Image (cartoon, rainbow, N blue to C red):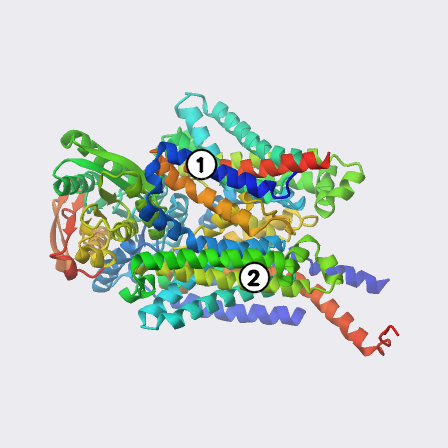
Amino acid sequence: MNRYFRELSVVGALVVVLVAMAIFAPAFFQPQPLLSLVTREAPTLVVACGMALVIISRQIDISVGSIFSVVSVCAGLLAARGWPLALVLPAAAGIGALLGVVNGILVAGLRLPSIVVTLATMVTLRQGLNLVRQGEFVNMPDAVQWFGLPQTNGQWLLVGAALALLVLLGVAMRHVSAGRFVYAVGTDAEAARLAGIRPQLVTLLVFVFLGALTGCAAMMNIVQSPQVQPLSGMGLELKVIAAIVVGGVAISGGRGNLWGAFAGLLLLACVAPALTHLHVEAYWEKAIQGGIILLAVVADGVRSRKGRR
Amino acid sequence: MNDSGTRDWKSLLLRHEMLLLYVLVAEWLFFYFAGTTTNRRGVIVGFGTVDRQFDILRHSCEIGLLALALTPVILTAGIDLSVGSLLGLCAILFGKFWHDAGMAIPVAAALALACGALGGALNATLITALRLPPLIVTLGTYSLFRGLAEAITRGAITYTDFPAGFLFVGQERWLGLPTQAWIFFLVASGVWVLVHRTTFGRSFRAIGFAPEGARYAGLPVERRLALAYVLAGLIAALAAIIYTARLGQAKADAGTGYELFAITAVVLGGTSIFGGTGSVHGTLLGVAAIAVLKNGLACLPVVMRMNAAEEMSGLLTGALLLLALTGSVLPRLWSQWRAHRSAAALPSPKPHTPT
Amino acid sequence: MKSLLRLALAAGLLLTGTLGASAAASSKLVVAFLPKSKGNAYFISCKAGAEKAAKELGVELLFDGPTDSNAAKQNEIVENWITLGVDVIAVAAENKEGISTALRKAQKAGIKVVTYDADSMPDSRSFFVNQATPEGIGHALMDDAARLLNGEGEFAIITASLTAANQREWQKHIEARLKEKYPKMKIVAVRPCDDLKDKAQSEATALMSANPNLKLIMAICSPGVPGAAEAVKQAGKTGKVKVIGLGLPNENKRYVHEGVTDTVILWNTGDLGYLTIYAGVALAKGELKPGAKSFKAGTLGTFAIAGDHILLGKPFAFNKGNIDQFNF
């Protein structure tokens, strides 16, 4: 069977959904609203790229939602103080990376389980932010929105940046040795070590990278509106992890790719607007999303069973 | 002889559970002294009152039950993210059976328990029959169960007006203790016996250490795993009933986010998230440590003046978890460092260079 | 090891001693103020009014609540306060029946209970400080929507979550009013935004493209209003799709001035907190008794009491003309 069967089947499901939308709700494809919807998902894609690396290296990070919130508020405050965006953007990436370093050191340095470490940092960051901000919105100057560009240009810039990152990373993961190191560590850390890779360093770096990308994503989100809500990013971790898993990246590490994660993200991101367009009531949304995740993993399971036989 | 004796004694005192017990006692004493005051009317109030201790017990029953449910699961190196959502689903099913189908409370409760077990069985089937990663399966059912609960009630229906006899379970005392505490202790002892005194418990650990090894050793790995998840579903349903009785209402958002508290308690209690090691009494201590911290902070004058009890308890729970995790690896790092140093002290062997 | 432990114990005792002493010194009346959720700007502005009242009256104010809207946690916090022996508890109930069990317990312990914002069961509190009934809110929103659309056309609702009790209640009254008075208007969709502004923005975008005839978006949770407004602005539909909702002036000023959001409906939340504290303290001092017909609250003047509801007044509509006068 084709080695990209898993990714192709997600793309197939996505195509089916899109065709169904084209027949039953063609209004879905009006260019401007669609661009807006896609732009709203661009930050999620950026986080998903970083998360895919972390999961491929056999770790997980559930603190991204909290990191996203913290960076959003910090960047918003800096922008509100009149910092030029050319400085706010690296500052956002820097704060994100710094928080990634904390996770990375705890996981790679002390060899603690990543799910528990990031659970702890998730709670700590979220409650710390609550304590400091008490939910208050940050108002930013108008010039921040769309980096000061006209709206459509700004939207294309964000979508373009996210897609460029995806393509670059997707290619790098396959053709650059650093990318293959991530797969090697995720498949078998000990074998990777014997092959001359430093697994702990790779692990640390993927966490830092994810942190930095989350910082950039937060920045990409706050330029889409003039106010920052401290809650923004709540639940992001589950959304991203679900998309990646649906896209065929194995939670046990070493398998899957960014293209699949991208398709998974699009598929899950489609659900809410598709329901709106089909005039289905919102009550079923969560159940449908759960169903898609289960269907995807069941497909995985059935296939690997067949493979074993 | 004597030397090894003292070492055993020392290692017992330094075991994770013992350390956690020290933390718990220290916490408790701290809050007892710092969180108890006399109010304007000269009545002793705050943490040191019997009422408060019972409140802590009542407030931690549901999360405690979920933590108990998760202990065997995590021992097998699995995880169940869906318990909180299943609690919500079972709560509204229980309400529906009683209110809409007109069943008697015990029948409705039994059916709700069955539904919980069924939900656990769904997880179990996907995990064992298809050998899927538990994290992902239960991430899916986490959405699915909550989604079903919302779909069934359309978000709107809240079941209330339960009979007093039922509310007794959640709000009154029986034989001196909050009624649900008895249920909790019963389940806790049941799970303790299962994990520590039966071959099931040993097989959970064996599976957690090395599933293939357990298989070769002749253990029915699939059946044991399934047992752990079905049990988790059953206990989640029980927690749902107690939750309903405590609040007097069943609603689709019941138990939102409880899975994270429960996992935190289990891990704080010393059960390795990689499976294989851990204990039920550790989990109980973990639950208690978090509950005392949460309730104690709400009694501290300093925290009250900051209006920050909720945030502080979240913050400190996270910090405590990190501390416990770091603490758990310190001995390993220490011995590694010592080994490294003594290796460095030896004359290093000549590097072997190919000629 | 042993000496270390002893040292730690001594340090702990020393610390506790100082902390305990400072608390016992306070002999003021203690009023505990419970919001539905703490981080919500709405309740923070209520708290500002409550603090002002507490200062004027010389009472100690405790403010704590769930960091998310969580009925179970509200009960736990009330029970905490009972054992802390506070004198007055003021509650915005997340869930009517759920909280009442805890409040009855508080009353049994001799604590005076008032509710504000959202009521509990009548037997579990002395007075409800009524800022506006759910009916009043529902009607105000629906009437305003009808005024903007001339009683005709499609609109959509953005709510906090499908399960939030107050949202359900408002929605019910909006629908009832619609049925009764505006047969030519239609609700095309109800979408949850999880109290997230970002999600409200995405939902509103999808709503507009899915319903080309959509004339108005009504956001009934405070983060939803700026979210929907930003979506309308970005879709270039300012004026074609109107935005109204329940929200705070500060979060919506810019959209009201840009003409995206037409009206934001709310009462003066600071006054609500202020009045609640005054009522609670008067109750504890015995100055306010069941059956009273009116009540004087500090600098705000006299309020009418209907039955056991202290009436704050009608919901207030913030629009271009008056929104700059308010800062909360």
Q: Position of residue C135 (x, y in %)?
A: 19, 38
Say which amino acid is labelled 1.
Val
Residue depicted at 27% across the width and 40% down the height: C157
Check residue A207 in the rendering and tell me which mark sits there, or answer none. 2
Q: Position of residue B341 (x, y in %)?
A: 77, 75
Horizontally, residue B279 falls left or right of residue B319, namely: right
Residue depicted at 81% across the width and 78% down the height: B345
Residue depicted at 62% across the width and 59% down the height: A175
Q: Secondary structure at mark 2?
A: helix
Q: Nearer the viewer, residue A80 or A19?
A: A19
Q: Residues within 10 Å of mark 2 (few under 14, many from 20)?
A: many
Q: Position of residue B246 (x, y in %)?
A: 43, 38
Q: Between marks 2 and 1, how big is the CA–CA gap?
A: 34 Å
Q: Position of residue B285 (x, y in %)?
A: 59, 51
Residue assigned mark 1: A17
Q: Pick the quarter of the image with the N terminus of chain A.
A: top right
Depicted C260 relative to depicted B218: above or below: below
Say which amino acid is labelled 2.
Phe
